[in-house]
Image: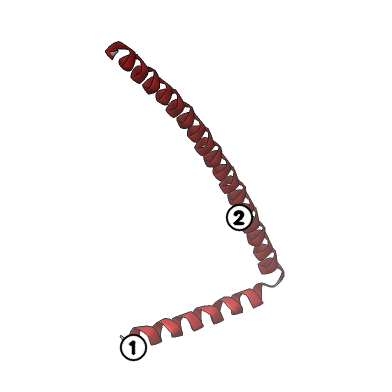
């Protein structure tokens, strides 16, 4: 009787171990798939961002070449405004 109970317990334990192994495998596959999809998505986003940045740089360079004096004037105005804002912020403290 003890041998039968021990054998049943051993078989139940083995069955649970097999179920656990299958569940572990399913979780591992799911996590791996999701990580790979996330990496692919991040790579695509990086590529789109990089292309957009390169396009913006090219457009800016073309604009500067077409209108150099306006570009310098705009840069000076932006610098002056930024300096004024920082100056006000520094004096407040």
Name, please, the residue furthest toward the right. 66
Judging depth in this view, the residue of 71 and 55 nearest the camera is 55
Looking at the rendered structure, the secondary structure element under dot 1 is helix
Q: Where residue 83 sits in the image (x, y, percent)? A: 45, 81
Separation of marks 1 and 2 at Cα, in angstroms: 38 Å
Judging depth in this view, the residue of 48 and 79 nearest the camera is 48
Q: Seen in the image, is 84 located left or right of residue 42? A: left
Q: What residue is drawn where x is 63% and y is 74%?
A: 71
Residue matched to label 2: 49
Judging depth in this view, the residue of 87 and 35 nearest the camera is 35
Residue matched to label 1: 92
Q: Where residue 68 sits in the image (x, y, percent)? A: 66, 72
Q: What residue is drawn where x is 54% and y is 79%?
A: 78
Judging depth in this view, the residue of 86 and 17 nearest the camera is 17
**Other-residue count near label 2 (Cα within 10 Å), few / some / many at <14 / 14–19 / ≥20:** few
Q: Seen in the image, is 7 located left or right of residue 54? A: left
**Other-residue count near label 1 (Cα within 10 Å), few / some / many at <14 / 14–19 / ≥20:** few
Q: Where residue 30 sits in the image (x, y, percent)? A: 53, 37
Q: Is residue 73 above or below residue 35?
A: below
């Amino acid at each position: 009787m003890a041998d039968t109970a021990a054998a049943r317990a051993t078989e139940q334990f083995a069955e649970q171990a097999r179920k656990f192994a299958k569940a572990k495998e399913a979780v591992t596959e799911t996590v791996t798939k999701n990580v790979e999809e996330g990496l692919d998505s991040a790579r695509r986003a990086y590529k789109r961002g990089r292309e957009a940045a390169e396009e913006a740089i090219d457009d800016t360079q073309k604009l500067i070449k077409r209108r150099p004096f306006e570009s310098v004037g705009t840069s000076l105005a932006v610098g002056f405004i930024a300096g004024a804002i920082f100056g006000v912020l520094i004096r407040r403290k």
